[in-house]
Image (spheres, helix red, strand yellow):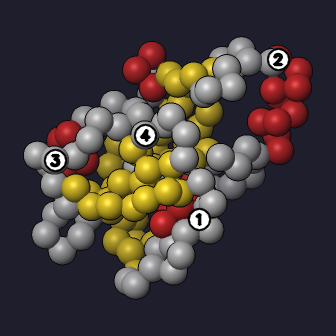
C-alpha cells in the first residue's frame, strides 16, 4: 500500500488514531457482467480497485490513477454510482493504523488489454459473478456492485 505523504505526516503526529480518508473505488465488469476484484498481499483479502484521494487531486483523477496502478487498465469513462462511509467502512490495518473511508464509487468502462499492474502489492486480479464473489474488505451493497 502506497501511503500518500500527507497521511504519513498525519500518522507521525497522531499515531494509529482513526483517520477519515476520502477515497475512490471502481466497479469494472467484463463482457458477461462479472466484477473485477483485486487481491493484495497481506490480510486485506479481496477488494475493488480503490484508493485514497490525494491532496489537490480531483476524485476522477484519483480513480484513473488507482485503476491504472492496481489493474493496468486505463479508464475510458466513469459515472458516479454512490457514496459510502460510516462505521461499516472502518478498517484497521495490520500495523494498527485505523481508518474510516468515505468512498465515491464509480462504474467504469476500461480499455483492453491491460498492462501489468504498477502496484507491487497486487497479487491477483480476477472476475467474479454475483454467486461466486468473495466477501470484500469493505461492505459495498451487492445492488451497487452488480446492479
Measure the C-alpha gap from mark 3 to mark 4. 15 Å
Q: Position of residue 87 (x, y in %)?
A: 45, 16
Q: Is residue 64 visible?
A: no
Q: Position of residue 24 (x, y in %)?
A: 51, 48
For the point 36% across and 54% down, which residue is it?
Answer: 37
Q: Position of residue 72 (x, y in %)?
A: 51, 73
Q: Is residue 5 visible?
A: yes
Q: Secondary structure at mark 4?
A: loop
Q: Quadrant of residue 47?
A: top left
How many marks overall?
Answer: 4
Q: Earlier in the sequence, mark 1 or mark 3?
A: 1
Q: Which mark is residue 69?
A: 1
Against 17, is 26 above or below?
A: below
Q: Earlier in the sequence, mark 2 or mark 4?
A: 2
Q: Nearer the viewer, residue 134 or 4?
A: 134
Give the labeled residue for mark 3: 132
Measure the C-alpha gap from mark 1 to mark 3. 25 Å
Give the labeled residue for mark 4: 45
Give the labeled residue for mark 2: 14
Amino acid at each position: 500500500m502506497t501511503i500518500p505523504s500527507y497521511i504519513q505526516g498525519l500518522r507521525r503526529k497522531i499515531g494509529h488514531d482513526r483517520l477519515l480518508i476520502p477515497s475512490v473505488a471502481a466497479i469494472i465488469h467484463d463482457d458477461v457482467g462479472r466484477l473485477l476484484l483485486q487481491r493484495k498481499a497481506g490480510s486485506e483479502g479481496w477488494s475493488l480497485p480503490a484508493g485514497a484521494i490525494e491532496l489537490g487531486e480531483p476524485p476522477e483523477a484519483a480513480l484513473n490513477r488507482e485503476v491504472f496502478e492496481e489493474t493496468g487498465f486505463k479508464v475510458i469513462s466513469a459515472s458516479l454510482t454512490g457514496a459510502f462511509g460510516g462505521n461499516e467502512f472502518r478498517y484497521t490495518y495490520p500495523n494498527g493504523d485505523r481508518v474510516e473511508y468515505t468512498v465515491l464509487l464509480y462504474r467504469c468502462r476500461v480499455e483492453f488489454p491491460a498492462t501489468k499492474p504498477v502496484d507491487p502489492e497486487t497479487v491477483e486480479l480476477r472476475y467474479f459473478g454475483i454467486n461466486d464473489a468473495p466477501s470484500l474488505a469493505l461492505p459495498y451493497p451487492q445492488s451497487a456492485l452488480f446492479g
